[in-house]
Image (spheres, rainbow, N blue to C red):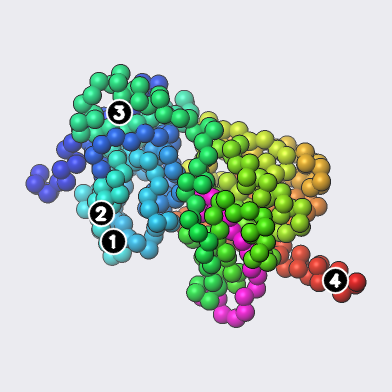
């Protein structure tokens, strides 16, 4: 390819600077300027568009461990939300032109159009090894005039930004108003089976799709929705989505979930929703050293012994006893057990309540893009709502 056909950004100097002073130089990718955030790495070999538009990546600089990025371009159908939420993007070998029949444009152009500052030509293997050894950390991407400034000055900006610990971000990425996802619009034929409320903490668009295609009407509501407002939908169940930020700041959502647990409404949560359930039951949460991000994370379902390859994106985890059933610290909710664990580091990957209808997992069963090993969890939620509804009907008939 001639020099004239190479995007101008590809020759603009850029710098990735970590909070410990480690610097990586390359050239600009996407918008030219500066971006601050938490540097994290994701191990997925594909699905870069879904990753970038996942609201869980808000305030983060994504380092792609896969070397070749942008090969298939971008298209409107694969977006998981209305915009790119990542604060910045770090890649090794950016595709000069996409080659895919579904492509509607280049990733470089899309990043630039949305003002996302990136860097290419970086040894992402070295960046990943550094983050794995030192942990996820504050960082900045600087390109163009910004990259020419003294590193000491840029490092001051990196260090001055807030840490991910203590950040409350769900309200920043949630939907502005409620909307419904109908089963009939997603291939379901027949009557609607159940009606649920899904609290959007940074939900990916594929999640309500997976529920709707199983006959469930999904009322997606903002993160600030109250218990009373949610109950006005007369839900058969409540769902809490994935999302960014520190679960220790989510007191509003913890109270929301506790109200549903006390009312006996079936509960299913994923990712952030797993951490919220953990807090609602009285357990603590903590920040992981570098988190789990990618669609190749091995998890064991302890009830069956089966291993699932899962899609994940989280930097925090629930602190709960790993062995056997235990009384929840909030004793009114009865017994709970860790249902799933990570095979990489034994992190809690799921909770199952034994005396109330509630369970959660730390990963993304909608898996777009990614494996579909965990799709059965949507069916488990439907079975839980069906069992609860049948039990209530029998109780009412007995009266």
Counting residues from the N terminus, which is met first, the one under dot 1 or under dot 3? 3
Residue 368: percent from left, percent from top? 46, 57
Residue range (magenta)? 187-204
Residue 373: percent from left, percent from top? 56, 57
Counting residues from the N terminus, which is met first, the one under dot 4 or under dot 2? 2
Describe the element under mark 4 as helix, strand or loop: helix
- The alpha-carbon separation of the residues under discs 1 and 3 comes to 31 Å
- The alpha-carbon separation of the residues under discs 3 and 4 comes to 66 Å
Counting residues from the N terminus, which is met first, the one under dot 3 or under dot 2? 3
> Which residue does the image show at 28% across and 38% down from the upper left?
119
Q: Nearer the viewer, residue 335 or 148?
A: 148
Describe the element under mark 3 as helix, strand or loop: strand
Q: Which residue is mark 4?
A: 396
Counting residues from the N terminus, which is met first, the one under dot 3 or under dot 4? 3
Q: Which residue is mark 2?
A: 106
- The alpha-carbon separation of the residues under discs 2 and 1 comes to 8 Å
Please say if 247 is above or below 309. above
Nearest to the eye among marks 3 and 4: give it.
Answer: 4
Nearest to the eye among marks 4 and 1: give it.
Answer: 4
| Label pair 2/1, CB-CB below 8 angstroms | yes
Q: Which mark is residue 103?
A: 1
| Label pair 3/2, CB-CB below 8 angstroms | no
Q: Give the crowd class for mark 3: few <14, some 14-19, many >=20 residues within 10 Å.
A: some
Q: Which residue is mark 3?
A: 24
> Which residue does the image show at 25% across and 58% down from the upper left?
105
> Which residue does the image show at 90% across and 72% down from the upper left?
398
Q: Nearer the viewer, residue 378 or 93?
A: 378
Q: Give the crowd class for mark 1: few <14, some 14-19, many >=20 residues within 10 Å.
A: some
Report the side of 353 relative to 219 (left or right): right
| Label pair 3/4, CB-CB below 8 angstroms | no
């Amino acid at each position: 390819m001639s020099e004239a056909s190479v995007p101008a950004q590809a020759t603009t100097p850029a710098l990735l600077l970590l909070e410990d002073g480690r610097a990586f130089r390359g050239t600009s990718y996407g918008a030219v300027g500066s971006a601050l955030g938490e540097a994290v790495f994701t191990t997925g070999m594909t699905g870069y568009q879904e990753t970038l538009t996942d609201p869980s990546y808000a305030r983060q600089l994504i380092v792609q461990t896969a070397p070749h990025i942008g090969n298939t371009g971008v298209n409107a159908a694969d977006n998981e939300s209305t915009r790119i939420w990542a604060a910045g993007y770090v890649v090794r070998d950016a595709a000069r032109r996409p080659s895919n029949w579904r492509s509607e444009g280049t990733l470089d152009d899309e990043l630039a159009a949305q003002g996302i500052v990136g860097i290419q030509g970086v040894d992402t293997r070295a960046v990943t090894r550094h983050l794995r050894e030192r942990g996820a950390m504050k960082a900045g991407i600087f390109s163009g005039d910004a990259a020419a400034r003294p590193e000491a000055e840029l490092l001051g900006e990196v260090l001055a930004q807030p840490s991910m610990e203590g950040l409350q971000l769900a309200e920043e990425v949630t939907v502005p108003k409620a909307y419904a996802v109908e089963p009939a619009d997603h291939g379901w034929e027949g009557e609607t089976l159940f009606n649920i409320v899904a609290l959007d903490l940074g939900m990916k668009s594929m999640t309500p799709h997976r529920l709707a295609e199983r006959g469930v009407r999904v009322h997606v509501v903002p993160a600030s929705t109250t218990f009373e407002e949610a109950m006005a939908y007369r839900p058969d169940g409540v769902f809490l989505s994935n999302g960014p930020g520190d679960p220790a700041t989510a007191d509003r959502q913890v109270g929301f979930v506790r109200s549903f647990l006390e009312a006996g409404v079936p509960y299913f949560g994923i990712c952030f929703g797993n951490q919220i359930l953990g807090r609602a039951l009285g357990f603590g949460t903590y920040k992981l050293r570098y988190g789990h991000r990618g669609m190749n994370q091995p998890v064991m379902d302890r009830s069956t012994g089966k291993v699932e390859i899962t899609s994940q994106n989280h930097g925090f985890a629930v602190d709960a006893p790993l062995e056997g059933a235990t009384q929840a610290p909030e004793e009114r909710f009865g017994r709970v057990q860790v249902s799933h664990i990570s095979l990489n580091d034994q992190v809690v990957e799921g909770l199952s309540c034994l005396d109330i209808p509630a369970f959660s997992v730390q990963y993304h069963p909608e898996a777009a893009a990614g494996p579909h090993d965990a799709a059965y969890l949507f069916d488990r939620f439907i079975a839980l709502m069906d069992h609860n509804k049948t039990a209530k009907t029998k109780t009412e008939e007995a009266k």
